[in-house]
Amino acid sequence: MRRPVPRSLRAALPVAVAAALLVSACGGGSNSGDVAEAAPVGDTLANPQDSTDSTAALVKAVADYLDAQASKRGKGSPEDAATRALAEAVAQAQADDPLPAAPAATQKAPVQQTKKQVESLRAANSYEGATSAKANARIAAQKNGITDVGVTQDSIKMGTVTMHGMALGNVLATPLVNGVKATFASINDRGGVLGRRLSLVDCDDGPGEVSRSKACIKKLVQQDKVFAFLGYSSWASASVHSDLATYRIPAIGTWAYSQTEWQDSYMFPTHMSMIHEAMANAHWVKNVIKPKTYGLVCLASPEMQLACQQVQQILDESGADLVRKLDVAISETSMSAQILSMRAANPEHIVHYVINPATMVKFMVEAAQQGYYPSKGISGNHLAAEVLGSLFGQHPVGRYWTNTTYKLWGPEFMATMNKYARGNKGLNHHIVQSSYVGALVFEKAAKTVGPNLTRERLMAQLANGDVYTADASLDQRFSWAPAERYGQNWNPEYGQGREYMYKYTSTNTVSNPDGTPSGFEPDPDQFVIYTNR
């Protein structure tokens, strides 16, 4: 016979289980435990009289939720042990404090009933519903709106790190910062985030040096006292995970240069990871180009080497032969020798995962000087930019493709840039789009959290499985649920599962006045490309 659960413990059980639900919503397991530990489930405890749900009703909601989740997972899940322990505690509490029998009509619709009860639980213990809104409004008022570092009653200070010292930084890094400031200005003109105006402090880490990047984080957190990061556009983004964890500060809208950005519970990328981009591009090459032989141009960094491995695996399995792989540095002064090597191997198609645009610009310019181009063209990532035509010139026209996370360019995005960042005209690129979406995601998530805005509450909200959708013209959506961050079960309709392939058709790649692309056309054979097919 099981020992009865004390009444004091039964009274606390819904809150404890709600905390467990937040752990599950934020990803479960050790990878997202940092967020879950700080999840503010106790915010409503200070004002229990506002709660309209009885202890028994909350316990029943939790029990139904656990049953539904266990049914979805099936047997053998690593989460089953924790679920069983919670379920046993819930069952004991129910036995000691049972609910009245439900009417027959309700019993016939258990799914609908469970959904209603789970929504009630979330309203009482998360960031939605009148109870939570009232409680958190009081908390914010008691703190005079100063709810966390960088947050006041009428302002939110954000930070970003940008490698202005990179090659072509004036046409790539500067527009990024301008784009974030422009988006913040548009949000402020709409009333800000519940009356709080957004501002941005930028820190230059030179050419993306790790030591300078870490120094930027320290300065922004300790000296400038920013609330969170919006974007993180640096080669060093793979090396700052421990810094974010140390300061317990989130980074929203990062560019996902490193796969580890998707796996860091403090980072919320608004761009497909490079490895996934490589998979999508490789499937497109397999489906559309169908080369018998191919070459690879790969940046000599761990992230891009992993990306090229994915390309090779997919294309090799299709029967294509890799005849030359070139590993290049960020600071290549010339690509002539590499081009000669590729000419000797004579691949039908070349795939590049260099990410550094300057390197591929040198490749294209020097390939034109040598009169060389593979018979079935070149494809690769990260070169969807308005400035591309002026850099690439005529030689690759009609024979080059680039894959990108968002549709190009979008009337709302371009209208925002044209109004608030006029210096970006002709310089916008797809990472500016990514930062723009990141800023809008932050706006929506912060409003959902409400006036009691804290880093922990923001991260819990972003990680709870909600889907954040860009406007229809950009046609992309993101979630930072565990399925999107880890494993093989990402949604093929979200930003980790699909993107777009554009063909370079003209040297005039500056956006049309209506926000439609010029010089880039949707690939006529397969415009929407996927990471798994």
Image (spheres, rainbow, N blue to C red):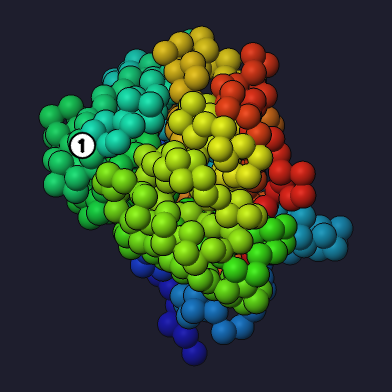
Q: Residue at x 42, y 32 (%)?
A: 136
Q: Residue at x 43, y 82 (%)?
A: 3
Q: Residue at x 70, y 48 (%)?
A: 528
* Residue lying farthest to the front in this orientation: 370
Relative to 309, is 511 on the left or the right? right
Q: Amino acid at mark 1?
A: Asp
* Residue lying farthest to the bottom in this orientation: 1
**CA neighbours of label 1 inside 10 A, class few (<14), some (14 to 19), many (20+):** many
Q: Position of residue 423 (x, y in %)?
A: 42, 13
Relative to 155, is 465 on the left or the right? right
- Image quadrant containing the C terminus: bottom right
Q: Is residue 15 above or below residue 254?
A: below
Q: Is residue 492 visible?
A: no
Considering depth in this image, is 317 or 128 the residue closer to the camera?
317
Q: Position of residue 523 (x, y in %)?
A: 71, 44
Reading the image, the residue beneath label 1 is: 205
Q: Is residue 358 visible?
A: yes
Q: Residue at x 59, y 58 (%)?
A: 349
Q: Is residue 150 above or below residue 116?
A: above
